[in-house]
Image (cartoon, rainbow, N blue to C red):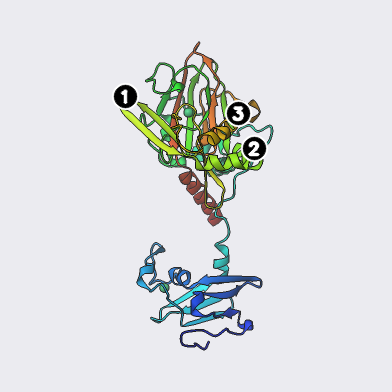
Amino acid sequence: MPVSNSAFAAKAASDNVFKVVEEVKSIKVLAGTTTLLELPHLWLRDSCTCNECRVSKTQEKAFILSEVPADICPIDVSLVGQVLSVEWPDRHQTQFCLEDVLGLSLPRTEGSLVWSEMFQPSYFDWSSFLTDDTTARSLFKTFLDYGVVVISGAPQDPDALELLAPRLGPIREVLFERIHNVCVDTHVYNVAHTPMALPPHNDFASYTFPPSVQALHMLHNEAQGGKSIIVDAWAIAESIRAERPDYFAILCQFSVPFREFDVTTETYTEAPIIHLDVDGCITNVRFSNQLMQTIDPRRSDVDKFYDAYHYLCCRITDEANRVTFRLEGGHVLLVAAHRVLHAREAFVASGIRHLQDAYYELDNIANNFYLLNTTEANDV
Ligand SMILES: [Fe+2]
Ligand SMILES: [Zn+2]
């Protein structure tokens, strides 16, 4: 392909490559038969996958953009089939398969699914989950879709949650205990250590990044009452976005103080109730009535926040939004804690009720699911 000196002349459309003038800082190229891609020069240079620009053993990037000027411009561009070749002023060569570039828009994971009206969590057997990849894949898929599963047949031994690490990834430790004991005769730093009802909440809202997965392992449950409750906070937040976008907006913007503490421990953060990613998708609903602290009433928009917060509280405590079931000894409730809130009805401590909590991270579960799927694909 001929190269002009500094400003490229437009090439014939039949070449599928249109070189544009330098000031535009990008090239346009037809990928496939219908998709016109605009590729910034800096993107092209930064994305080079050659062995000089990557650590070949790990495929990590080695090239860093500060090695070239901000106004870097190709001296030659050509397209053969779907392979785009770019030559740079220092004669460095970069090649792209345009099908790979189009593939970058595919989501790496599937989105979550909405709970049906009669939704109940699915149950999976503890031993099968640990030993059988098909069961593990099925559990992970269900968990990533709905944000909740129950594992039955767990050992009724203290700290058995440690045994889930090969599947769920390492325990995410937070302050207080590595494996938290929830019973009425333990160290009381939280309303959970009383027989009182607990409104829906996620744990450790007082952390800047609260644990994203929580396992609640019922060792023994001989108490009257105390049924477990789960609430899909993302579904509630989506309904508020549809019905009251003004409420939704302030719940995304107004930071709320949360604190969990005892005499030797202090955890505190300020964050909005609803957190969105850059595309506006909900990534976290942080809700804990018990850990929320008094808001400075002189802050602007406190009144607006409280209107929205009242609306949210009514939704979260609405029985119609609850899924209720009883955790028996040997059951582990696993929740995607940035989405699914957990709660408990009050109970009468007429018999032993001993629950243990541990936390994990959703990234590690998604990773293990990905690896299991990759292994399966390679086995076929
Ligand atoms: Fe909790
Ligand atoms: Zn390169």
| Snapshot quadrant of residue 98 | bottom right
Q: Are marks 3 and 2 in contact (CB under 8 Å)?
A: no
Q: Quadrant of ligand 2?
A: bottom left
Instruction: Count neighbours of disc 1 (C-alpha within 10 A) and say few if under 14, some if 14 to 19, many if 20 or more.
Output: few
| Snapshot quadrant of residue 164 | top left
Instruction: Count neighbours of disc 3 (C-alpha within 10 A) and say few if under 14, some if 14 to 19, many if 20 or more.
Output: few
What is the distance, in whole Å, between disc 3 and disc 1 at their CAs?
33 Å
Amino acid beneath label 3: Cys
Say which of 117 and 278 sits in front.
Answer: 278
Q: Which residue is mark 1?
A: 263
Percent of width and height locating residue 83: 54, 76
| Vertical relation: 170 (above or below) 279 | above
**Mark toward the viewer: 3 or 1:** 3
Q: Which residue is mark 3?
A: 314
| Snapshot quadrant of residue 262 | top left
What is the distance, in whole Å, between disc 3 and disc 2 at their CAs?
19 Å
Percent of width and height locating residue 271: 45, 39
Q: Quadrant of the C terminus?
A: bottom right
| Element marked by disc 1 | loop
Say which of 232 and 20 sits in front.
Answer: 20
Residue in view at x 43 percent, y 72 percent: 50
| Element marked by disc 3 | helix
Residue 63 visible, this angle: no
Residue farthest toward the top in the current orientation of the protein: 350
Say which of 346 and 60 sits in front.
Answer: 346
Amino acid beneath label 1: Val
**Mark toward the viewer: 3 or 2:** 3
Residue in view at x 44 percent, y 20 percent: 193
What is the distance, in whole Å, between disc 1 and disc 2 at their CAs?
40 Å
